[in-house]
Image (cartoon, rainbow, N blue to C red):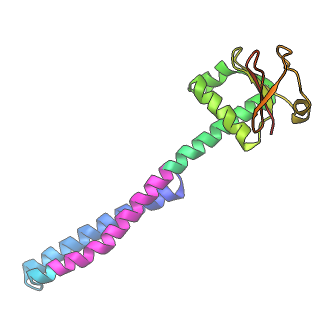
Amino acid sequence: MNSGRIVGILLIIAGIALGVIGVGWLIASVATGNLGVTGAILGGALLALPILLLLGAGVFLLVRSGREAVVDAEREILRRILDMVQSKGQVPISDLVFEFKSTRDQVQNQVHALVGMGVFSGYVNWEEGVLYSAEAANLRDLDRCKHCGGELKLVGKGVIHCPFCGTEYFLP
């Protein structure tokens, strides 16, 4: 559990506690005659401001920490994909789909995210379903596909595509 989530929960608890104590005090003051109804209404209105601030800040921190947890989980998956490919040299896409309980499209998007960050160099043949790691220096001088020998075309920043077999080469 991260600190933002803990602080958010504590702020919500503090807001609820302040509300319970404040309302209890106002009710007791009206019941004993120490405070009139109009004073209790004014006290309640003044009490609502810190309660709403505490609850709002707590909810904000909870929501933000939830979003951060999702981003952290995605980063962990990207790091593990990169580690698997670099340590093994080649990894079947089906292994990545199984390992991360995802779909082929999600794995494809994750591989493209790694390429976009400039941390992965290698190539993939989506039809065969294998992701290969390669040194960027070896790929920069490539003019023919390693898979079919076809002429390669630059299709995007750091991506070279073979129009014949569909193999994509990724340069950092």
Query: Does residue 131 appear in this view?
Result: no
Find the magenta span and give its range. Answer: 41-66
Quick check: is 51 in the magenta stretch? Answer: yes
31, 90: nearer the viewer = 90
Q: Position of residue 10 (x, y in %)?
A: 41, 62
Image coordinates of residue 88 in percent, x first then y, are 79, 25
Q: Position of residue 34 (x, y in %)?
A: 11, 86
Residue 53 seen in this snapshot: yes
Give the quadrant of residue 89: top right
From this view, report whether residue 133 is shown above or below residue 23.
Answer: above
Q: Position of residue 29 (x, y in %)?
A: 14, 80
Picture quarter containing residue 73? top right
Task: From this view, report whether residue 121 is shown above or below residue 146.
Answer: below
**Figure check: 154 above or below 145:** below
Query: In the image, is 54 to the left or to the right of 47?
Result: right
Report the front residue among 30 and 142: 142
Extreme residue in the bottom direction = 34
- Residue in the image at 13% along x and 74% along y: 27
Q: Quadrant of the C terminus?
A: top right
State the image quarter where residue 82 is shown: top right
Q: Is residue 160 magenta?
A: no
Give the residue displayed 47% in from the left and 58% down from the top. 6
Residue displayed at 13% across by 76% down? 28
Q: Please, what is the dominant secondary structure of the magenta stretch? A: helix
Total labels drawn: 0
Q: Residue at x 74, y 30 (%)?
A: 84
Q: Is residue 126 left or right of residue 87?
A: left
